[in-house]
Amino acid sequence: MTVMTTIGVPTEIKTDEYRVALTPSGVRELTDHGHRVLVQAGAGAGSQIADADYEAQGAVVVADVDSVFAEADLIVKVKEPQPEEVARLRPEHVLFTYLHLAADAELTLGLMASKATCIAYETVTDLRGRLPLLAPMSEVAGKIAAQAGAFMLEKPLGGRGLLLGGVPGVAAGKVMIIGGGVVGQNAAEIAIGMGAEVYVYDRSIDRLRELDVLLNGRCSTCFASAVELEQRLPEMDLIVGAVLIHGAKAPRVVTREQLAMMKRNAVMVDVSIDQGGCFETSRPTTHSDPTYEVDGVTHYCVANMPGAVPVTSTYALTNATMPYVVKLADGGVAALRDDAGFKEGLNVCGGRVTYAPVAEAVGVEACAPEAALAA
């Protein structure tokens, strides 16, 4: 028999974050399973979801965030908890959200101190080793990266004053995409659609073959050696960093020294910024203040790119996360033991880091997930 779980949905408070972790459809599914759902008033406003829409499907709308954390067993969010949210976590809480801990030692230590069970969307895997809860936001971020990069190339925004797709008689701009995963593929699709000359780099020959087919040969697929990248950098107008190592800190693929090879006012978009960034000169920015310049090169490093399009990204995200939220609500943390891919999402439990790449990145000892769950 399923025990009733209280699920809490707080309003996201990260700067320029408008998504919400649960839709009214999700509320309906959870309440149909016999669970109680608490939604903070206004949590869905940024995604055009009214409190009344939640109430119509059985949610209880509460006025403040303290009530959400005080009464909920399972907290579902979109972005990593901010300091005031970490302070509200208790050992009996299960937190399910994006965490990206490898690039944030302070947050990792805070979650360890809370002794809450913290599960990261971005490290949950499926039977084929893919990242089903990261993929939808990677699709959105890849598309935004190409759009934002094209926009930032305009002169009033600090760019070169170049129309990415060109016009008859004037050559199109050149785009380098480093990383051929979900982000890279989607960035390439948009850049190709704009009419740009596109080069996609990856270290997997098999993936480059796949991209050549998926993109119908409309771009150049290139092996990502240091020499090849350096030879192309001087030609590029826009570079998209789309490098991912599951749950780990992003590797550096463009150094500050290499910026000197680039055109003045070229644009770099770092989609890997929530994992620490894949350009040496990257630092997180916000949608309100998205760019800065280093050595004459414009950097766009917004850490929550999909947050700019919440009506799209909220539904894309919750379509993917909902089955896992239901599993957690129905079975508690025991649901992780029965699903090896879901267990990969466990990052912190009982004051211990249970995901090895995070432990290595922040300099703490890793604990086996099974041991942490048993304790």
Image: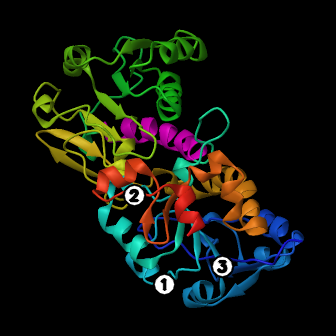
Q: Which part of the image, by quadrant, shows the C terminus?
A: bottom right
Q: Earlier in the sequence, mark 1 or mark 3?
A: 3
Q: Quadrant of residue 242?
A: top left
Task: Say which quarter of the image contains residue 341.
Answer: top right
Q: Secondary structure at mark 3?
A: loop
Relative vertical location of residue 158 with respect to residue 290 in this rendering, above or below? above
Q: Which residue is mark 3?
A: 73
Kindly identify which residue carries mark 1. Answer: 88
The residue type indicated by label 1 comes to Arg
Distance from the alpha carbon under mark 1 to that under mark 2? 18 Å
Q: How is the image coloured?
A: rainbow
Q: Which mark is residue 101?
A: 2
* In the foreground, 139 or 334: 334
Q: In the picture shown, does residue 331 fall above or below 245?
A: below
Q: Residue at x 43, y 66 (%)?
A: 352
Question: How many other residues sit within 10 Å of disc 3, few (<14), some (14-19) or many (≥20)?
Answer: many
Residue 138 at x, y percent in the picture: 52, 42
Type of amino acid under label 2: Leu
User: What are the residue bounds of the magenta stretch?
Assistant: 134-153
Give the mark nearest the N terminus, 2 or 3: 3
Query: Is 144 included in the stretch rendered in magenta?
Result: yes
**Of the pair 366 and 96, the residue shown nearer to us:** 366
Label 2, label 3: how far apart the Cα atoms are: 22 Å
Horizontal side, residue 296 vs residue 277: left or right: left
Secondary element at tag 1: loop
The alpha-carbon separation of the residues under discs 1 and 3 comes to 12 Å
Three-letter amino acid code at the position of disc 3: Asp
